[in-house]
Amino acid sequence: MTKADEPKDLQQKKEESQQRHAVIERDVMRVLGRPADLHQVHVRQVGQDHYRVNVLIGTDTSCLRIAHSYFVTTDGDGNVLSSSPEIAKHY
C-alpha cells in the first residue's frame, strides 16, 4: 500500500501527528538548547495530550544515549504546557 492508497482521513491524521511532534520538539529544544552531538529528538504519544520526549546524543548509532527525557503535556496544536521534570537551559 502506498501513501496515495491510504484513506484521506488516515493520511490527514498522520500529517497532524507529525506536525504536533514537530511543535513539541521545537518547544523542548528552544528551552533546552542544542547539544553539540545531538542525534535525534524522539517524541512518543503516551496519552491524549501527553508525550514522552527523549533527546538522544552521540556521534553514531552505536554510542547513542538519552541525555534528557521529559513527560510533557500539550495543547491541541502540540504547544508544550508543562513538563516533568521541568525543561531547563543546558546548552
Image (cartoon, helix red, strand yellow):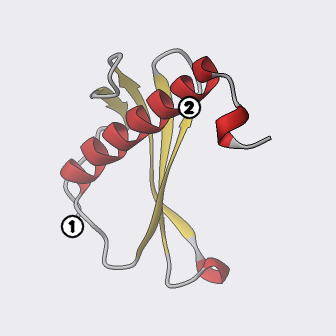
Tell me the amino acid under the disc marked 2: Lys
Q: Amino acid at mark 1?
A: Tyr
Circle 2 sits on which residue?
A: 14
Q: Mark 2 or mark 1, which is nearer to you?
A: 2
Instruction: Give left or right: position of 63 versus 23.
Output: right
Circle 2 Cα neighbour tier, 10 Å, few/some/many (<14 / 14–19 / ≥20): few
Left-right relation of 5 to 63:
right
In the displayed structure, 54 sits above or below 49; it is: below
Residue visible at 20% across and 49% down? 31
Residue at mark 2 to residue at mark 1: CA–CA distance: 32 Å
Question: Is 62 on the left or on the right of 67, as rendered?
Answer: right
Mark 1 crowdedness (10 Å alpha carbons): few <14, some 14-19, many ≥20: few
Query: Foreground: 24 or 36?
Result: 24
Which residue is at a point 25% across and 54% down the rendered structure image? 32
Secondary element under disc 1, as helix, strand or loop, is loop
Q: Residue at x 59, y 27 (%)?
A: 46
Residue 62 lies in quadrant:
bottom right
Element at label 2 = helix
Q: Is there CB contact under 8 Å for labels 2 and 1?
A: no
Chain-order first, disc 2 or disc 1:
2
Above/below status of 87 relative to 74 = below
Disc sitting over residue 91 in the figure? 1
